[in-house]
């Protein structure tokens, strides 16, 4: 029986409402009232919005009809024990240079696979569920802060259903030299949707970095939201590596609020998944922030991927740098949509965006759509976008040195994406990304 | 080693550039092909190296007893044919060392030889660098990116020296070089002269031939070889110019 509610409900939202109402997938036992209230409000918001249609500008390049037609309800509360396949996957995607590792299996913290003991003083790292119990004020203040935009159906659904996630809190002045590794694994045993909600807070003058890897088995829909809060002078780097399975739908959202003179460096590499969307929304609230949003996607077969960025300069003196590279082979479709807004009074903002794309087959396509919205007069903003094929002259040059056509193509594709990867500061992370890239590249044009 | 018979080639737009080239190059020889702009010199180099976009309508090219024209460009290279480009291509993001090692190992695999490890490769590189007056920093940069004109040409000769081809075709390698760079390039070419190797230098000017003495000199004009002789022909051409060729052709 359908739940009776007093708000408008889009038809495709109904099954999610029912699942929430049934209790077992909604409010978790022992959750505080503020969270339960937040989940309820978020669900109502989702019910009203439904899934975005292609008529909505931010979603025009993604085909979500399958999701509308067949509900993918949140995975149940029972997490299967990590099997041999999970261990093997973990070994395959793991990063050797991490300070700590936190593993989430099917959207829930897996302590037996994680290594988060012996945290340095001033560092709090744990599951979102643990943070709700141990650090309620931190989680609550982030969650109840007004959302950047109202129409965020996936974030709303995530808020209603998230089971777990991770929280990293770095106290003012504390510096974490090595990256924290977060691995999101899907065991393949649950199906349905995995909703994770995470939070990173870096105090004034603090510094930290994370590598988030998304991988798994089987068919699932991952709906991930991570929120970043950088206090004055804080520095934070996030690398997101999406290596989901060929049957996976991945909707990832990164929301960041930048305090004065803080520095954010984000890099996303989308390699696996049937349909992948990564959206980064950054609000530069303090003066003189530095925001580097870089990334790449590499697609083949019938893969679809979208990278969407929005940087909102609300204060003067901010700097934004964006370099995104796209590669599509087979019948893949990629898209980049990048918006940079400079609000009135946000003078001396310096923003540059570059989107360069390689289309490797006649049936592949890449769309790129830069948008600059500038309401201040003393700013430096520019963008460049290009879509093309591999350089024939360069291919011929490599051929005349004896390098076979396929190898020459791989060398040029690798070089193309490498230019973006080299913008990652950490040499260890760069190396890790390049090795994952090489692995993907070997199978790109099969 | 190389035998070209009645070679005709046209561009995609139908213009015939090569109109019946006959040329035989033996192992151990250095040939110079001279001619004015538009005579078909670079087209000949491109057709021999296997560049797309040319239609060979007539004639044959035999290289080491095989039909060269049916082989793709990369196979020609692995069979020992090398083209030094008039305009070496810039390849952003591909490290010069990495590129060269990939090329050498592709050729070694083809010959059934073991690949060079990093140490062996580096030793071979260092020996050649010295000879061509190339700084090691050049190797750490992306292929030809940000190289000066002279650096690009030296990099071509450096690659030739590393790849040790059977047949090297140098397409206007001397153009745009100052006299010091020209001497370095000439030294590299001279050092590559060997009994089992042939070198074909395509050039507009006689200048390079003062430093690399050819066994044979050919004059290309209107898509045909209109005159052949020994090294003295180059000197004579320099004196009388290409202007009179109209009558000979």
Image (cartoon, helix red, strand yellow):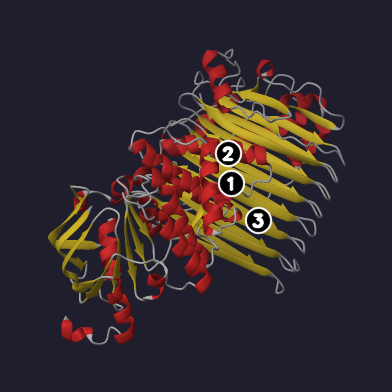
Q: Which of marks 3 and 1 is in front?
A: 1
Q: Mark 3 points at which residue?
A: A311
- Would you say A116 lies left or right of A280 here? right
Q: Is A301 drawn above or below residue B164 in the view shown?
A: above
Residue B82 percent coordinates (x, y): 35, 54
Between the C-alphas of marks 3 and 1, the distance is: 21 Å
Specify whether residue A276 is in view: yes
Between the C-alphas of marks 2 and 3, the distance is: 25 Å
Q: Is B7 drawn above or below residue A226 in the view shown?
A: below
Using a 10 Å C-alpha cutoff, classify the residue at mark 1 as few (fewer than 14 neighbours), some (14 to 19) or many (20 or more). Answer: many
**Same chain, marks 3 and 1?**
yes
Residue A337 percent coordinates (x, y): 53, 55
Specify whether residue A147 is in view: no
Q: Pointer 2 and pointer 1: residues touching (CB < 8 Å)?
A: yes
Q: Mark 2 points at which residue?
A: A433
Chain letter of disc 2 in the image: A
Residue under the image location 38 percent in, 46 percent down: A403
For the residue labelled by badge 1, is the local secondary structure a helix, a strand or a loop? helix
Q: Of callouts 3 and 1, which one flags the residue occurring earlier in the amino acid sequence?
A: 3
For the residue labelled by badge 2, is the local secondary structure a helix, a strand or a loop? helix
Quadrant for the C terminus of chain A, please. Answer: top left
Q: Name the residue under label 1.
A: A421
Q: Is A89 drawn above or below residue B127 in the view shown?
A: above
Q: Of callouts 2 and 3, which one flags the residue occurring earlier in the amino acid sequence?
A: 3
Using a 10 Å C-alpha cutoff, classify the residue at mark 2 as few (fewer than 14 neighbours), some (14 to 19) or many (20 or more). Answer: many
- Would you say B35 lies left or right of B66 here? right
Residue under the image location 47 percent in, 43 percent down: B101
Using a 10 Å C-alpha cutoff, classify the residue at mark 3 as few (fewer than 14 neighbours), some (14 to 19) or many (20 or more). Answer: many
Q: Of callouts 2 and 1, which one flags the residue occurring earlier in the amino acid sequence?
A: 1
């Amino acid at each position: 029986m359908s739940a009776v509610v007093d708000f408008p409900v889009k038809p495709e939202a109904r099954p999610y409402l029912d699942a929430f109402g049934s209790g077992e997938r909604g409010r978790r036992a022992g959750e505080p009232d503020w969270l339960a209230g937040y989940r309820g409000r978020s669900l109502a918001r989702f019910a009203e919005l439904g899934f975005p249609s292609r008529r909505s500008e931010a979603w025009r390049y993604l085909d979500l009809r399958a999701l509308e037609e067949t509900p993918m309800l949140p995975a149940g509360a029972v997490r299967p024990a990590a099997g041999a396949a999970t261990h093997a996957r973990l070994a395959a995607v793991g990063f050797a240079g991490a300070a700590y590792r936190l593993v989430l299996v099917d959207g829930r913290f897996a302590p037996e696979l994680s290594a988060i003991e012996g945290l340095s003083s001033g560092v709090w790292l744990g599951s979102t569920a643990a943070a709700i119990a141990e650090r309620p004020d931190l989680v609550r203040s982030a969650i109840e802060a007004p959302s950047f935009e109202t129409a965020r159906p996936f974030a709303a659904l995530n808020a209603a259903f998230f089971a777990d996630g991770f929280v990293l809190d770095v106290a003012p002045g504390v510096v974490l030299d090595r990256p924290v590794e977060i691995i999101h694994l899907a065991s393949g045993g649950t199906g349905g949707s995995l909703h994770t909600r995470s939070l990173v807070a870096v105090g004034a003058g603090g510094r930290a970095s994370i590598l988030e890897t998304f991988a798994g088995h089987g068919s699932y829909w991952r709906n991930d939201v991570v929120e970043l809060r950088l206090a004055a002078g804080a520095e934070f780097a996030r690398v997101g590596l999406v290596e989901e399975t060929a049957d996976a739908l991945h909707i990832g959202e990164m929301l960041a609020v930048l305090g004065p003179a803080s520095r954010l460096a984000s890099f996303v590499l989308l390699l696996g998944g049937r349909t992948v969307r990564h959206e980064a929304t950054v609000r530069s609230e303090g003066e003189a922030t530095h925001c580097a949003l870089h990334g790449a996607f590499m697609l083949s077969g019938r893969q679809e991927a979208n990278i969407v960025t929005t940087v909102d300069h609300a204060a003067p003196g901010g700097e934004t740098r964006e370099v995104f590279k796209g590669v599509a082979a087979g019948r893949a479709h990629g898209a980049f949509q990048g918006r940079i807004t400079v609000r009135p009074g946000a003078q001396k903002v310096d923003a540059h965006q570059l989107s360069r794309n390689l289309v490797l087959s006649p049936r592949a396509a890449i769309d790129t759509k830069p948008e600059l919205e500038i309401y201040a007069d003393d700013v430096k903003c520019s963008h460049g976008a290009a879509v093309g094929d591999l350089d024939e002259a360069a291919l011929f040059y490599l051929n005349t040195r004896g390098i076979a056509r396929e190898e020459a193509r791989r060398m040029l594709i690798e070089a193309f994406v490498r230019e973006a990867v080299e913008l990652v500061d950490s040499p260890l992370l760069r190396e890790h990304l390049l090795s994952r890239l090489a692995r993907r590249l070997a199978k790109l044009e099969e | 080693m190389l035998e070209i018979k009645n070679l005709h080639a046209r561009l995609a737009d139908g213009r015939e550039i090569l109109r019946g080239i006959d040329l035989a190059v033996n192992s151990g020889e250095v040939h110079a092909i001279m001619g004015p702009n538009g005579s078909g010199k670079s087209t000949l180099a491109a057709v021999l190296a296997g560049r797309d976009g040319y239609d060979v309508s007539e004639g044959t090219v035999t290289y080491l007893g095989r039909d060269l024209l049916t082989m793709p460009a990369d196979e020609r290279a692995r069979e020992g044919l090398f083209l030094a480009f008039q305009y070496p291509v810039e390849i952003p993001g591909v490290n010069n060392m990495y590129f060269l090692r990939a090329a050498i190992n592709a050729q070694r695999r083809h010959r059934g030889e073991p690949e060079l490890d990093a140490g062996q490769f580096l030793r071979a590189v260092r020996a050649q660098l010295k000879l061509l007056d190339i700084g090691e920093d050049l190797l750490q940069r992306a292929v030809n990116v940000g190289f000066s004109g002279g650096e690009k040409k030296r990099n071509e000769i450096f690659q030739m020296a590393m790849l040790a081809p059977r047949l090297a075709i140098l397409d206007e390698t001397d153009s745009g070089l100052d006299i010091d760079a020209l001497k370095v390039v000439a030294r590299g070419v001279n050092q590559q002269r060997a009994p089992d190797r042939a070198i074909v230098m395509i050039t507009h000017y006689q200048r390079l031939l003062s430093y690399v003495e050819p066994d044979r000199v050919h004059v290309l004009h209107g898509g045909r070889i209109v005159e052949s002789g020994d090294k003295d022909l180059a000197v004579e051409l320099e004196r009388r110019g290409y202007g009179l060729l109209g009558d000979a052709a």
